Amino acid sequence: MKLEIRNVTKLFKGKIAVNNFSMEMQSGECVGLIGPNGAGKSTLIKVISDIINSDAGEVLLNGKKISKMKREIGYLPQYPNFFHWMTARETLTFMGQLSGLKKEVLTNLIPEILTKVGLTGEENSKVGTFSGGMKQRLGIAQALLHKPSLIVMDEPVSALDPIGRREVLNLIEEIKKDTSILLSTHILSDAEEICERFVIIKDGTKIEDTTITELLNRNSENKLIVEITAKDQKWIDVVKKLPYVKGVEVIGLKVKIKVENIEKNKNILLKNALEHKVDIVKFEMNNDTLEEIFLELVMQK
Ligand code: ADP
Ligand code: MG
């Protein structure tokens, strides 16, 4: 499997939803497409899955146009449309037939796929009785029916409660073993758990294509977190003027201080605090979390 997205642009009534977006993906990869609401994730995913056409650019799978390779791709929409009065088996039969699979083939495939997504025993239950996590697993079953080499999932866990989220994340871990995965989310921590590679999209434009490790390393800037009491807030003005302090961010009683040469200056800063009779509640070295890095990226560029 090789997916190539080349200079894809999509407009809605003249407004750009996806802007000259390119990326490649190889077999065995799990890629998180991350971006805030309205970034263009669903639009891009629909172009990749050949649900809508782009205005410019192209999507190739194994070197061939995606419209000719639909059998190789499974798509889980952000809002799957199920008929609540259908059973799980009826749903999969209906959707399987829509995607061109024969009824006889489906009779064999459906029990196998229901087992895979952990819905054995539920084949005759009505979808209307399913929890959010079960519905989403049925959606994944639908996307896997024709055994695609790539599955594309649009916000597969964003709308779920913690239990449903756990069920679906565990299932995705399983699928990952034999299928390449592209999933979108606006919640970084959802992707953090399963994908090593992140592609960040904002206002339709790709702003990052990186790995968790690289992101964390790049941002392992030297910061000290000092928690002080309310009476010592005036010390912050002293800190701001220190020559080795590069930045100060105040969050409640916490002061995040970016310093040069942290090893040397952390003790000097501590000494300064003591000289000013600052009551220290907490004093620690800290790296930005992925969530903080993500926010910074999405807010800035
Ligand atoms: P995301 O999935 O990242 O939240 P979308 O791809 O749904 O973002 O939307 C990207 C932009 O395109 C948004 O500004 C949205 O309002 C617009 N958009 C999406 N679908 C349509 C549509 N069918 N008609 C008009 N505008 C749309
Ligand atoms: Mg969306």
Image (tube, grey):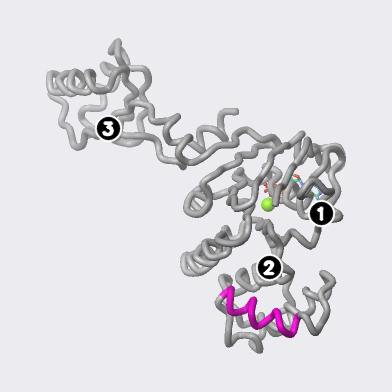
Q: Nearer the viewer, residue 133 or 75?
A: 75
Q: Which amino acid, by three-letter code, is at mark 2?
A: Leu
Does the magenta portion include 21? Answer: no
SS at badge 1:
loop
Q: Ligand 2: does it lie within 8 Å of the C-beta at label 2?
A: no
Q: Earlier in the sequence, mark 2 or mark 3?
A: 2
Horizontal arrangement in the rendering, residue 16 relative to residue 168 (left or right): right
Q: In this view, does 158 lie above or below 291?
A: below
At 62% from the left edge and 60% from the top edge, which residue is drawn? 179
Please give the range of residues in magenta.
106-117
Q: Which mark is residue 285?
A: 3
Look at the image and say whether residue 111 sits in the magenta stretch: yes
- Identify which amino acid the numbered label 1 is placed on: Asp
Q: Earlier in the sequence, mark 3 or mark 1?
A: 1
Frontmost of labels 2 and 3 is: 2
Q: What element carries label 2?
A: helix
Q: How many marks?
A: 3
Marks 2,3: beta carbons within 8 A: no
Quadrant of the image occupied by residue 34: top right
User: In the image, residue 212 lies at what x, y percent?
Assistant: 48, 41
Disc 3: CA contacts within 10 A as few (<14), some (14-19) or many (>=20): some
Q: Quadrant where the C terminus lies?
A: top right
Q: Nearer the viewer, residue 248 or 267?
A: 267
Q: What element carries label 3?
A: strand
Nearer-the-camera pick, 131 or 280:
131
* Mark identifier at residue 50: 1
Name the spot of residue 279 as percent of width and height, x first: 15, 31
Q: Name the residue under label 2.
A: 144
